[in-house]
Image: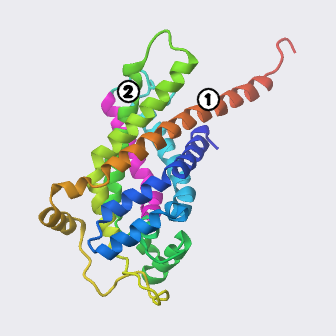
Amino acid sequence: MAADFWAGYISGAIGIIIGNPLDVIKVRLQAGHSHADASRAQLSRFEKASSLVRGAAAPILGYGALNAILFVAYNRSLAALDGSVTDPTNPVGVSAYKIWLAGAVGGLASWTISSPTEFIKCRAQLDRRPDVSSWTVAKDIFRTRGWRGLYFGGLITSARDSIGYGFYFWSYELCKRFLTSHDEGSHQAALKILLCGGIAGVVTWGSVFPLDMIKTRLQAQTITDYAPGTESQSLLRSQRQTLNSFQIAKEVYHVEGIKAFYRGLGVCSVRAFIVNAVQWAAYEWLMKSFNHSWDARVTSQEPIAGL
């Protein structure tokens, strides 16, 4: 299979392992529980290391595949938009808007995996029952809503992904071009990738954070309030009115103000910088390793001249 698929898959899984603890905090801040007892319960759960890996199973499995599809779709789209591209990891001379469009296409392509993965992750991270797992949440969604239920909130997730990943690749490439120097050594090149990857992560989340907050609130509606002795109760609160994305945005603005749309952005930015610095470094290193291995194999199979 293509090098960019496996490089994207492995780097995506690495990113989730590193960033999941901060992602748990970000999602809970976005959900905006108003009851004091719920807030105290969340704070007490932060003291347990197990709570900070809550919901990691679905992203580790899903985000690797998501990242693989993202990079493959981006690379193919960029090559289709600009025939001069020979190395997608270094698209010299390609217009910035083409890079943005290719990233947006990659984001849309990855939506088929990101939507159910995000829903399961969000539900697992916000659920207040002890020892709930991603698998438990997935089974509950499937039992209550069927396969289509896994794509609840899919429209706003696709908007977030297409816009966000457009800025993701755009900011990464522009940062690399800005920092390029002729006497760049391997050490400087590695630091540049880490810095540009981190900046790309922060720019991406800054561009779509309000959409992500609305998505979190939308998906959080499907969770019931947990109380001891109700373990067998369905997680879905079918008895309450479910608001759509526009209604949630309107309600949040009137009740909590504009600041609510950016609650958790600080934690998210720290996470985004760390995760994407490592993820881009892993991706570029893996791409070079895979391509070098492939070139060496092809060379070893070439016939000896004169025979």
Judge whether 204 appears above or below 41 on screen.
above
Where does the C terminus fall, quadrant-wise? top right
The x and y percentages for residue 7 are: 59, 40
Q: Quadrant of residue 80?
A: top left
Look at the image and give the residue range highlighted in magenta: 96-121
Residue at the spot 43% in from the left edge and 51% down from the top edge? 109
Q: Nearer the viewer, mark 2 or mark 1?
A: 2
Residue at the spot 33% in from the left edge and 26% down from the top edge? 95
* Amino acid tagged 2: Cys
Name the residue tied to disc 1.
Answer: 288
Disc number at residue 175?
2
Q: Nearer the viewer, residue 86 or 188?
A: 188
Q: Quadrant of residue 240?
A: bottom left
The x and y percentages for residue 257 are: 15, 59
Residue at the spot 57% in from the left edge and 50% down from the top edge? 13
Q: Quadrant of residue 197?
A: top left
The x and y percentages for residue 177 are: 39, 21
* Amino acid tagged 1: Lys
Work out which residue is located at the far top of the displayed protein and give it: 183
Disc number at residue 30?
none
**92 to the left or right of 100:** right
The x and y percentages for residue 233 are: 45, 88
